[in-house]
Amino acid sequence: QSALTQVPSASGSPGQSVTISCTGTSSDVGGYNYVSWYQHHPGKAPKLLIYEVSKRPSGVPNRFSGSKSGNTASLTVSGLQAEDEANYYCSSYAGSNTLVFGGGTKLTVL
Amino acid sequence: EVQLVESGGGLVKPGGSLRLSCAASGFTFRSYSMNWVRQAPGKGLEWVSSTSSNSSLIYYADSVKGRFTISRDNAKNSLYLQMNSLRAEDTAVYYCARGTWSGYDSTFEYWGQGTLVIVSS
């Protein structure tokens, strides 16, 4: 159950788009369409942004979108806003009823 | 409004035990799977354990198997995590999270704010 790989940090200016990647293997990201993305402001409860690769729960702005190609999933945040500054985590079903998370990406809005 | 409130964290010595609780409100607790996820200081999230709505399906991460026990009391709208044989590497903020349906679920729709567990002598 090795963690998924995320770049530790990313940044963008207000209004820009930023893409955060999440790389796994054929045993997790590449093998299942059960990738989720979470936004976490430190000290608060994590928030579900994307599930099943590209689905958005109700209430999540369409500025947030997800995709997957092979063993890499991606979260794109369009029209960056100051409140988007947070930590972002991906997760993937990894078979045998286990789940693996990424190490997290700290997004800074410049 | 869905609310999940964890409690029971604290300082415990290596080898000791601790029981975490998660009080749920704002939804029909008995209809949803529940989970524990932790975050060690400066680290990412780590899935710990999951239980289906009726406790018939229970799963653990290898790192806690045999030491931690997840349970729930649907009459009390509460989720628990009994942690035994605690190690320094179990130091983390522990979050409870709700699934999207009653069975095994890899999507965690709602989360609590967490409770801190420190394992140190």
Image (cartoon, coloured by chain):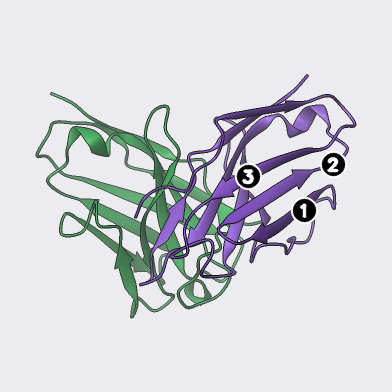
Quarter holding residue B88 = top left
Packing grade of label 2 (10 A; few <14, some 14-19, many >=20) is some
Mark 2 and mark 1 in contact (Cβ < 8 Å)?
A: yes
Same chain for marks 2 and 3?
A: yes
Q: Identify the residue at the far left of this view.
A: B15
At a point 78% along the width and 19% down the height, the residue shown is A110
Mark 2 secondary-structure assignment: loop
Q: Identify residue for label 1.
A: A65
Q: Identify residue for label 3.
A: A21
Q: Position of residue A39 (x, y in %)?
A: 64, 42
In which chain is the residue bearing label 2?
A
Nearer to me, A86 or B56: A86
Q: Identify residue for label 2.
A: A78
Mark 3 secondary-structure assignment: strand
At a point 32% along the width and 42% down the height, the residue shown is B8
Q: Position of residue A75 (x, y in %)?
A: 70, 48
Taking B47 as reference, is B83 left or right? left
The amino acid type of the residue labelled 3 equals: Ser
Residue B58 image label: none
Packing grade of label 3 (10 A; few <14, some 14-19, many >=20) is many
Taking A87 as reference, is B74 left or right? left
Q: Colour of chain B?
A: green
In the displayed structure, would residue A61 be above or below residue A84? below
Q: Colour of chain A?
A: purple
Label whose residue precedes the other's in the sequence (3 or 1): 3
